[in-house]
């Protein structure tokens, strides 16, 4: 499978991203679309952004790093992306399940898409821009110490508060997916 968009796919995706960018200015009030578009033009990350879009993630810019001159695109769908739910945390967790294995893991799917799981910090930043995961939850990049003990972390918003929880990495639920991000 080629991980490159053809010209029409690229044009279609840029149209979607521009419209979303313009409709959600509060997520990136000091960032100009023309500058983002220059960064996107011909960038190999377009394929990953398209994968995020196709799986229901609704990617949009949520941050800019001046030092690296890169923009952070993240899944901004109201709930955890629908096509990325019912996954355990990673390959180790998937292999540890003896019965009722999920189809895959969040880490594997993210890697295939060329994106990263959001960190706790990125997730809290996203939540400061709106209300996300009010009915679902999202696996987050788990610190090595927690993962080495068999756990993984996830987040959601309940009672107008963002919660970060823990669970066994091998667990999976139809309402838990993952939010990804990619620097462009």
Image (cartoon, rainbow, N blue to C red):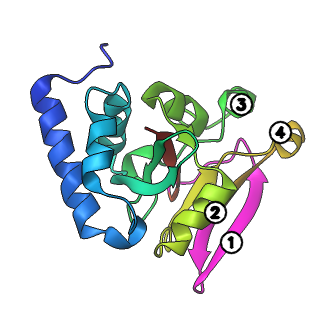
The residue pinned by badge 3 equals: 98
Relative to residue 161, is residue 39 depicted above or below? above
Instruction: Name the residue located 51 percent from the left edge and 59 percent from the top edge.
Output: 175
Dot placed on the residue nearer the N-terminal end, 1 or 3: 3
Dot placed on the residue nearer the N-terminal end, 2 or 1: 2
Image coordinates of residue 57 in percent, x first then y, are 37, 51
The residue pinned by badge 4 equals: 144
Classify mark 2: residues with Cα within 10 Å, few (<14), some (14-19) or many (20+): many
The residue pinned by badge 2 equals: 155
Q: Is residue 172 magenta?
A: yes
Dot placed on the residue nearer the N-terminal end, 3 or 4: 3
Image coordinates of residue 171 in percent, x first then y, are 68, 47
The region drawn magenta spans 155-174
| Left or right side of 181 for 171 | right
4 and 2 marks in contact (CB < 8 Å) = no
Q: Secondary structure at mark 2?
A: strand
* Distance from the alpha carbon under mark 1 to that under mark 4: 20 Å
1 and 4 marks in contact (CB < 8 Å) = no
């Amino acid at each position: 499978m080629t991980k490159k968009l053809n010209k029409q796919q690229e044009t279609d995706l840029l149209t979607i991203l521009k419209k979303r960018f313009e409709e959600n200015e509060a997520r990136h009030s000091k960032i100009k679309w023309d500058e983002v578009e220059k960064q996107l033009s011909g960038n190999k990350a377009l394929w990953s952004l398209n994968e995020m879009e196709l799986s229901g993630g609704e990617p949009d810019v949520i941050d800019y790093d001046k030092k690296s001159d890169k923009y952070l695109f993240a899944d901004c769908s109201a709930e955890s992306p629908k096509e990325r739910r019912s996954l355990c945390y990673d390959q180790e967790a998937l292999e540890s399940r003896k019965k009722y294995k999920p189809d895959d893991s969040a880490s594997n799917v993210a890697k295939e898409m060329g994106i990263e799981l959001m960190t706790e910090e990125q997730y809290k930043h996203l939540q400061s821009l709106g209300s996300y995961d009010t009915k679902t939850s999202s696996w987050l990049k788990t610190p090595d110490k927690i993962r080495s003990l068999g756990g993984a972390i996830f987040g959601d918003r309940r009672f107008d508060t963002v919660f970060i929880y823990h669970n066994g990495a091998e667990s999976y639920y139809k309402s838990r997916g993952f939010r990804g991000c990619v620097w462009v």
